[in-house]
Image: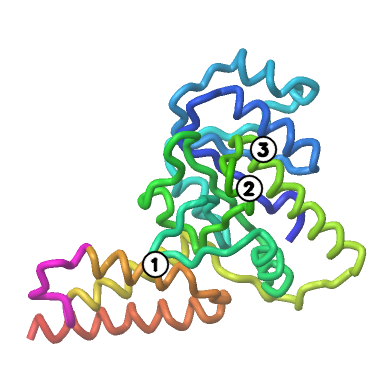
Amino acid sequence: MDFNNIHFGLVRTFDPGNIGSAFRGLINMGFENLWVINPINYIPKTIEMMAAGTRDRLDLLKKTDSVFDFAKDLDVVYGLTARNRKMYEQISVNELIAELENKKYQNIGFLFGNETNGLTNDELKYAKKTVFIQTSEEKPVLNLAQSVIIISYEIRKLLLDKRNNKKSKPKNFNYISLKKKEKLFNNMFKIFSEVFFKKEKRISKKKKILFNSIKRWDLTKTEFKYFNNMFIKLSRILKKKEEK
C-alpha cells in the first residue's frame, strides 16, 4: 500500500466546485487518484478555479460513468456515508485505520456520494464496508470536499507511519481485485442457479446477497485460482450430465 495505490471516487457530484476542492486537498496530501463518476455538473472552469494552485495537475483527474471502472482493479472499496445500511457493516474512521494497519491490501478505494442524498445501494455494490466520520450531533453534515480531505489526511498519516516503521508485506502476497471477485462470483452463481435456484422466484435478491458475501472475502491469487477452477470444472460436469 502506497500513495499511488489509493483511489478516491466522487459519484454524481452536483457542485463542480467540490471536485476542484477535493482534488486540491488530495494533491496537498500527496495523492493523485481522483475519479469523477457520472457527475451531474462537470464545469471545467469552476473545477480549475477551486483547484487553485493545483490546477496544473488536473490532467490527473479521471472521469467515468461507471462505478465498476473505478472499483474493478482495487482490492477493497469503502463507502463513506453517515447512514447505516443493513447489508453493510459500518465502521468509524479509527476502525478503518486499524483495519488497514492489519490487512495487506495494496489497492484501496474510497467512494463518496452525491452532496444531497449520498451513495445509493447500487453505488455501494462494490463496497466491503461503509465508513462514517464522527461529527457534532447538532450540526453533523460535512461538505463533500471536507470529507475527502479528512479521509485523505488519516490515510496519509497511516502511510507515513508504515513507511517510517518499514513494515514490508510478505513477498508474493496480494489480494485479488474486485474484478476477479466478480468473475469468481459469476462462475459460482452459474452453478448455484442450476443446482439450488432453478425454481426460485426471487433469484435477484439471492444473487445480491451472495455477491455481497463474496466481495468481502480477502482472497489471494492462489485461493482465487483454486476456487475459480473448481467452479469451472463443476460447471462442465453439470453440462455433461444435462447432455446425457
Residue underneath mark 3: 146
Q: x, y (%) of residue 69? A: 48, 46
Q: What secondary structure prevails in the magenta region? A: loop
Q: x, y (%) of residue 152? A: 72, 47
Q: Is residue 5 inside the magenta stretch?
A: no
**Alpha-carbon distance for marks 2 and 3?**
15 Å
Instruction: Give the extent of the magenta segment.
Output: 194-204
Q: Is residue 156 left or right of residue 107?
A: right
- The residue shown at (26%, 79%) is 235
Q: Furthest-front residue in view?
A: 138
User: Which mark, by number, is residue 212?
Assistant: 1
Quarter of the rendering occupied by the N terminus: bottom right
Quarter of the rendering occupied by the C terminus: bottom left
Q: Mark 2: which amino acid? A: Ser
Q: Which is more foreground, mark 1 or mark 3? A: 3
Q: x, y (%) of residue 213? A: 40, 72
For label 1, the crowd category at 10 Å Cα-Cα, with few meaning under 14, some 14 to 19 and many 20 or more, is: some
Q: Which is more foreground, mark 2 or mark 1? A: 2
Q: Write down the quadrant of residue 142 in the picture.
A: top right
Q: Secondary structure at mark 2?
A: loop
Badge 2 or badge 3: first in the primary sequence: 2
Badge 2 or badge 1: first in the primary sequence: 2
